[in-house]
Amino acid sequence: MKRILLALFLTLFLAACGPAETPLPDGPLPTDLFAGGTLEVPLGETHYLQDGSAIEFLEVVEESRCPANAMCVRAGKVQIRVAMSYGTEVIPMTLTLGELDEGDASVYTHADFTVTLQSVEPYPGTGESDATPIATLVVEATGQ
């Protein structure tokens, strides 16, 4: 009897340790994304795609772009971290615009999709320094 209870406990424990599916929001999902969709994702928010995957804007890693109201020797760059929940995978990405250092990229390519960083607003020197950053991302299916 103890062996049966132990086996049952282990089975339940291991089943609970499996990868979690992306939680879906209440209400309808967008229907026009994975065919070539542009998303505006505010910092800290998650956007859900047609296939049930999700993309979240995690943080601004670096903001060194030359302010709009200044003359600079270097253009600088903006670098952000996002995470794509795709099936049971969570794929972290670091995307950069502006001056790219070795290893920087504005595009992340997966076997099934591509994520491209188009912009991060507000741009420095526009008088909106307290505004929540918004990343404009293009998500396109590639492997379907």
Image (cartoon, grey):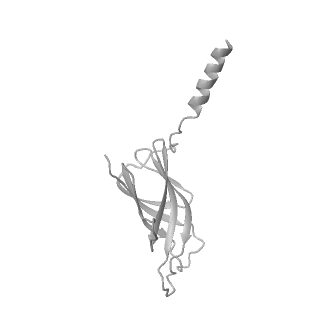
51 relative to 58, above or below: above
8 relative to 99, above or below: above
- Between 125 and 88, which is closer to the camera in this rendering? 88
Extreme residue toward the top, this view: 1
Q: Which residue is at 60% across, 72% downward? A: 130
Extreme residue toward the left, this view: 144
28 relative to 2, above or below: below
Q: Where's residue 47, x and y in %?
A: 48, 53
Question: Can residue 33 be seen from the camera position used here?
Answer: no
Q: Where's residue 64, x and y in %?
A: 53, 75
Extreme residue toward the front, this view: 102
Rendered-image quadrant of the N terminus: top right
- Between 43 and 82, which is closer to the camera in this rendering? 82
Q: Which residue is at 48% across, 41% downward? A: 88
- Between 12 and 7, which is closer to the camera in this rendering? 7
Q: Where's residue 18, x and y in %?
A: 54, 35
Extreme residue toward the right, this view: 2
Q: Quadrant of residue 117?
A: bottom left
| Total numbered circles | 0
Q: Which residue is at 45% across, 74% downward? A: 99
Q: Where's residue 42, x and y in %?
A: 52, 61
Question: Can residue 53 be seen from the camera position used here?
Answer: yes
Q: Is residue 131 left or right of residue 97?
A: right
Q: Is residue 74 left or right of residue 17?
A: left
